[in-house]
Image (cartoon, rainbow, N blue to C red):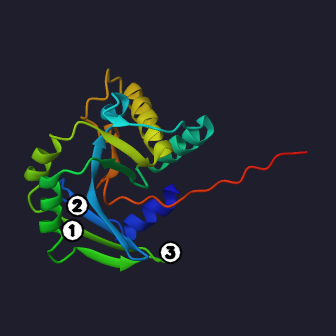
Amino acid sequence: AKAGFHRLRSQGSLIRDADPGLFLYRQALDGHSQIGLACCCRVQDYLDDVIRKHERTRKDKVDARTRHMRAVDANTGPVFLTFRDHEPLDHLMALDSSARPGFHFRSDDGVTHTGWKVADPAPYIEAFADIPEFYVADGHHRTASAARAAQEIALAQSRDSIDGTSESDWFLSVLFPASQLTILSYNRVVRTRG
């Protein structure tokens, strides 16, 4: 995974923006589309239950994902968070997504991905200050692993807290309004002996 990540960076498939920013991200599949704000969220908000969980996680999966994050030194997939609809945010997203996108493509699984860089993040930051909590919609293990990795890194750096000063204190997220979000089923088959 680490070699593949570095290969994508050296080939120019993945680039680091010169400045921090926010992006609108839309997914479309089978006639449904959902648009959210792609950003980094604070691990401390997850630990303080501002970002709420509703599933238990398995230790073996959190261990494996934490090792993966530490080895690659990156969040390799976003956590989907949701929040109660908020009219000012709906307005901002509709306005900013009417511009020409920075990327637009259809992946092999049939999902169309479109993204726009937000020109002025300040109105989003102000509007999100009104949102009291977020809910993990998809990515409980990724979020728990990001928290574990942040704690391990802070300890290794002799930092007393996860205060947001290190990149590891944040995790990749997309924040979707609840009315737009659709989560595809992830069915498991359990077999019993006997």
Q: CA distance from mark 3 to mark 2?
A: 22 Å
Residue at 42% over, 67% down? 8
Q: Position of residue 101 (x, y in %)?
A: 21, 75
Residue 131 in the image: x percent, y percent?
20, 41
Q: Earlier in the sequence, mark 2 or mark 1?
A: 2
Which badge, 3 or 2, comes first in the chain's sequence?
2
The quarter of the displayed image where residue 179 is located = bottom left
Asked if the residue at tag 1 contacts the one at tag 2, i.e. Cβ–Cβ closer than 8 Å, the answer is: yes
Q: Residue at x 15, y 40 (%)?
A: 129
The reply to whether residue 70 is visible in this rendering is: no
Quadrant location, the C terminus: top right
Q: Residue at x 41, y 60 (%)?
A: 182
Are the residues at dot 3 and dot 1 in contact (C-beta closer than 8 Å)? no
Residue, x 35% and y 23% (percent of image)? 158
Residue 23's label in the rendered image is 2
Seen in the picture, residue 92 relative to 107 is either above or below; the reply is above
Q: Nearer the viewer, residue 61 or 168?
A: 61
Q: Amino acid at mark 2?
A: Phe
In this rendering, position of residue 58 left or right of residue 167: right
Residue type highlighted by circle 1: Trp
Question: Quadrant of the rendered structure where residue 168 is?
Answer: top left
94 up-or-down from 177: above or below? below
Q: Circle 3 — which element?
A: loop
Marks 3/2 in contact by CB < 8 Å: the verdict is: no
Q: Amino acid at mark 3?
A: Asp
Residue highlighted by disc 3: 109
Q: Nearer the viewer, residue 47 or 187?
A: 187
Q: CA distance from mark 2 to mark 1?
A: 5 Å
Q: Which residue is mark 1?
A: 116
Estimate how packed mark 1 is, as few (under 14), some (14 to 19) or many (20 or more) residues with alpha carbons within 10 Å. many
Q: Give residue 179's mark.
A: none
